[in-house]
Amino acid sequence: MPEETNSILELRGVTKWYESAPERRILDGLDLVVGAGERFAIVGPSGCGKSTLLNLLGTLDAPSEGRVIVDGIDTAGLSEDAVARIRSEKIGFIFQMHHLLPQCTALENALVPTLALATRPNPTEAADRAKRLFDRVGLADKLDRLPSQLSGGERQRVAIVRSLINSPRLLLADEPTGALDEDNAKRLMELLAELNESEGLALIVVTHDRALAATLGSVRTLHRGKLESAS
Ligand code: ADP
Ligand code: MG
């Protein structure tokens, strides 16, 4: 038990295939323990199963075999609603495409995940937290902008604030820099690394870019359905 209190996420013997191609094991007996506050990148060529793995880590999809344990809770026996509640409370997501609501301001977009919490936070406190985070990512003066009035890098920083608004213990990012130019991509990775330190949350970033992955200091490769420490 003591060694479990410090892990935010565990995968045990996770195997995944899709019903349309059951003969192909995208993930094959994968084990992983993510400690609180830990960070690393996952790399591998396109199609190797990175997004599949991240979806399982984030409880957006379930394994074909094996167990996914979030903050000590085995998700296998739980209802979809119960899993969704755990996800809203403990896990933040950033995707390649920011998926911001075009008709909502930056601030409104950032507050959307608070609507999914079992107990909704006080609106003033939630807005204050959002403003602190906007300050943190350098967007304090752009709260009232619509997504169309922001640059690609700025939109992705709004998505970061949105991912952090519920104070998750784990942040999962799938190719978060995929739509950014090189400079903005580097800056975004550095920002994620800083947030991992200052907010004390675990961070896992999936990317096919090894140079960007190196920003996080620790890199693992997804190879033949398992994670290997990269050299
Ligand atoms: P990556 O993110 O590393 O590019 P993915 O996890 O998206 O890889 O995909 C891994 C493999 O699984 C690919 O061959 C892909 O075509 C296949 N795949 C992904 N999602 C599905 C799905 N929903 N149904 C069937 N096959 C899928
Ligand atoms: Mg992918």
Image: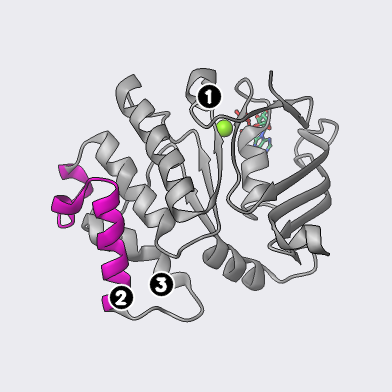
Give the label on residue 214, or none: 1
Q: Position of residue 77 (x, y in %)?
A: 80, 68
The residue shown at (27%, 35%) is 152
Alpha carbon separation for disc pair 2 and 1: 36 Å
Alpha carbon separation for disc pair 1 and 3: 35 Å
Three-letter amino acid code of the residue under disc 2: Glu
Q: Position of residue 145 (x, y in %)?
A: 15, 52
Q: Is mark 1 within 8 Å of ligand 1?
A: no
Q: Which residue is mark 2?
A: 125
In which quarter of the view is residue 21 placed? Answer: top right
Residue 138 on the magenta segment:
yes
The residue shown at (18%, 53%) is 140
Q: Which residue is mark 3?
A: 115
Q: Position of residue 127 (x, y in %)?
A: 27, 69
**Callout 2: helix, strand or loop?**
helix
Residue 81 on the magenta segment:
no
Label 1 vs label 3, nearer the camera: 1
In the rendered image, the quadrant that contains the C terminus is: top right
Q: Earlier in the sequence, mark 2 or mark 1?
A: 2
Q: Is residue 14 above or below residue 224?
A: below
Q: Is mark 3 within 8 Å of ligand 1?
A: no
Asked whether disc 2 touches disc 3, contact meaning CB atoms under 8 Å apart, the reply is: no
